[in-house]
Structure formats: structure tokens, C-alpha cells
Amino acid sequence: MSARPRLGVLLAAVAVLTAVFVPSASASAHAAPAVPKTAVLDGARLQQTKLRLDRGDPQLRRALRNLTTRADNWLHQGPWTVVDKPKPAPGGDVHDYLSQAPYWWPTTTPTAANPWGCPYVQRDGQRNPEVDTGTDRQDVEKVFDSTYDLALAWYYTGDKRYAQKADQILRTWFLDPATRMNPNLNHAQFIPCKYDGRAIGIIDFSQSYTSVVDAIAILGTGAPGWTKTDRAAMAGWNSDFLGWLKNSAFGKEEGAAANNHGTFYDMELAALAYATGDKALARQTVLDARAKRIDPQIAVDGSQPQELARTRSWHYSTFDLVAYTRLAAIGRHVGVNLWTYQGPDGQDLLKAVDYLLPAATGTATWPHPELEFYRYAASDIVHAAADAGDARAKAAVPKLETPPGGDLWTLRPAAEQLDSITG
């Protein structure tokens, strides 16, 4: 046989082997899920988790059952809207968000002349049940939680029901002219007969709204029904809201707060900046948090003195660290490693998490005031520190108390306030 025929046979054989062992470009594109451009969650990590699920990873399958149980519960609820409250915000616009200060209580029995029972006094850590009726606070929390659960459930399962429900909830609360919320928090955490709204009320959004920011990014990978028009309109709402946060008197006041309110403000500002394309602002916000937040808020031993002074010191210590761990996650997207930063006296985030480990693992009693201790409140932040390389946190993970509804860290590795008291 001449050299030319032998070469032809060899090339044919190579072609067959290539067809068998190398997937086509179209097959590869079909197999790999899109990477969501999330602000807090790591989109590439979500993609890898999705691939592991598709290959049948048993641990992830168990976590997915917990997630879809939550998502299934949302399918038959909502949508919610700010225009449904019995009374409009003090300005009279039903499209303005309204919430009531959670720890303020009436001092007299309401009468026709004094329908609120004014004046109001503060009882720190004791939640007034009337704040859950007549305002938008409970409904907006459902919007945040439902869209997050539904978007993640759609991404991991491909079940279009989850995406369609998330679409409906987002359009109703944020986009439809008849039911949308105005992009401001001018009347958040008002105190009857005292203040029409307060800067402190921004935390109604800053503690959870990044869940919506990430849900939008997840739906943006191709969710059925979430159109290009929807994406543009939601981006516009977020841009307007970011402008209000940066420029309003309330926004500036909240940004100057020295405790968890300031940390959450920075986290929300950075997330919205990143999501709307202002990566320079996102990066600068994370960089500034080192000297502006970590240095004054975290002591050398890792404690958070301002949070320990509260009647709910465990709750607020974990609460502040939820903001820090999310802020560190945003920092990852813009080239800032907040976990490795150390203040002038050696204060850092890993020490702050390590300070909680004895109580988080049940090996010691929390030694500070706490009206209602829930050990599982620390679970997500311990996971976050372990992922960041903290050996003590990694060793503590198997000893953590599982949160109600299961541990979802493997599917949504971003800290949540697991013992939320919604205020």
C-alpha cells in the first residue's frame, strides 16, 4: 500500500475518534449552564454546583429537596404590592414604601382623639406586633425571600413554574405602573406621632435586598418569561434606587452609622453599584469598609462591642457578620479580599467569626445578654469563614446546628440572617 492511502486511513480513524470522544461545540454549550452575573453569590460556583447536580451528586440532591420545598410553598402565595396597605405613607402616595419602627410601643390606650396611643417609647429587642399589620414590612420580606428561592430553584431544576412565579412577583412589586413601589425609602420605620420616616429604616431593604439583586441576575441567564424589557426596567429601578441611597439625606445618614446599619448600607450600596455597572463604586465601597467599618467595629479579640451592648447580642453579632460576609463576597468580584485585611490592632473578620464558634458549636454558653438565643443563627457565617480559609471555622462546620428547613449553603453560598426578627 502506498503512503498516501495509509495516510487517508489514518486521518479517517482520527476523525472517528474525535467524533466519539470530543463533544461538539453545540453539545458543550447545551451541557454547560450559564454563569449568572450575581453580585453576592459566586456565579461560577453556582454553575459548577448545577453541573454536579446534573451528574447526580447525592448531597446536593438532598439540599435541592429542601430548596424546592421552599420554592413550592411560594408558588401559591403572592404576588404582593405596596398599594395594598390600609393607609398610605404619610405623604399620601400609596406607591411609597411604609414600615413602622419595630421596637417602639404606645404608652396609652388608643382613643378617637389619639388613635395611635401616643407618645411611643422604645423597648430594645421587644418587637411590637402592630408593626406587622398595616404597613409593607411583612410583604416586602416575602418578595425578597420568594424571588431568591424561586430563581435558585429554577436555575437548578429548569422547572419553568419557578421562573414564572418569580417573574410575576418582581413585576408586581417593582415594575407594573398600577402596583409598583417608588424607588425610595422615605417612610421606612416611621414612629407614629413622632417621625414620618427615618434613615434607620433603610435596613428594611439593606438586610435582604441583595437577594433580589442576585435573583434578577439568575433569571437573566434565560428564565422563561423574564424578557429583555423586564431586565431593562428592573435595571432602571435599581439605578434609581442606588441614586436615592447615595444622594438622599436618609441615605447619607445611614451611611454614617457606626454599627450594623452602616455595614449593611455599604453592602447594599456595593451590590447595587456592581449590578448596575458601576464597578469602581463597588470596589471603593469595599475598600473603604476596612478602615471605616472593621477597624472601629471589631475588637482585638473578635468581639463586636456595639452589638454586644444590645439585648439581642447574639442576634446582632451574627447579623453584622452577615453584612460583612456578603460584602466580602462582593469584594471578590472587584478584586478586594476583605477576609485577609487586618486593622492596626490586628482586628479582622476571621477573628470575629471565631469569637462566635464556642456558642455556635454548642461547646460553651453565650456569655452576653440575649433575649432569645438560636444557635443556628451563626451557621452561614461559619460556612463563609470556612470557605475563606479559616481552619477553626472549617473544623466547626460539622458541629453546627442545622437551620430550620435544612442547610442550603451548598446551593446558595451567601450568608442569610437565619434567625431573622424582621427589624
Image (spheres, rainbow, N blue to C red):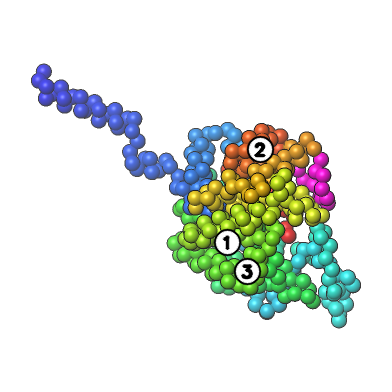
Which residue appears at 51% of the width and 61% of the height? 281
On-image quarter of the C terminus: bottom right
Q: Amino acid at mark 3?
A: Lys
Q: Secondary structure at mark 2?
A: helix
Residue drawn at x 63%, y 68% as measured from the top left: 251
Question: Does the segment drawn in magenta span residue 372?
Answer: yes
Compared to 68, does 195 lie above or below? below
Task: Tell me which segment is drawn in magenta.
Answer: 365-375
The residue furthest left is 2
Badge 1, how many Cα within 10 Å: few under 14, some, many 20+? many
Q: Which numbered circle lies on residue 269?
A: 1
Q: Amino acid at mark 2?
A: Ala
Q: Quadrant of residue 112?
A: bottom right
Residue 75 image offset from top left, x and y in percent: 61, 54
Q: Position of residue 156 (x, y in %)?
A: 53, 44
Q: Give how far apart the Cα atoms at labels 1 and 2 are.
A: 28 Å
Which of the labelled discs sits on residue 393, or is there none? Answer: 2
In the picture of the structure, the residue carrying the numbered disc 3 is 252
Q: Report the side of 34 relative to 92 (left or right).
A: left
Q: CA distance from mark 3 to mark 2?
A: 35 Å
Quarter of the image that includes the N terminus? top left
Q: CA distance from mark 3 to mark 1?
A: 11 Å
Instruction: Give the prevailing secondary structure in the magenta stretch.
Output: loop
Q: Are marks 3 and 2 in contact (CB under 8 Å)?
A: no
Q: Is residue 216 above or below residue 111?
A: above
At a point 70% along the width and 58% down the height, the residue shown is: 259
Q: How many marks?
A: 3
Q: Earlier in the sequence, mark 3 or mark 1?
A: 3
* Residue at 65%, 46% in the rendered image: 346
Which of 266 and 69 lies nearest the eye of the viewer?
Answer: 266
Where disc 3 sits, the SS reads helix
Say which amino acid is labelled 1: Leu
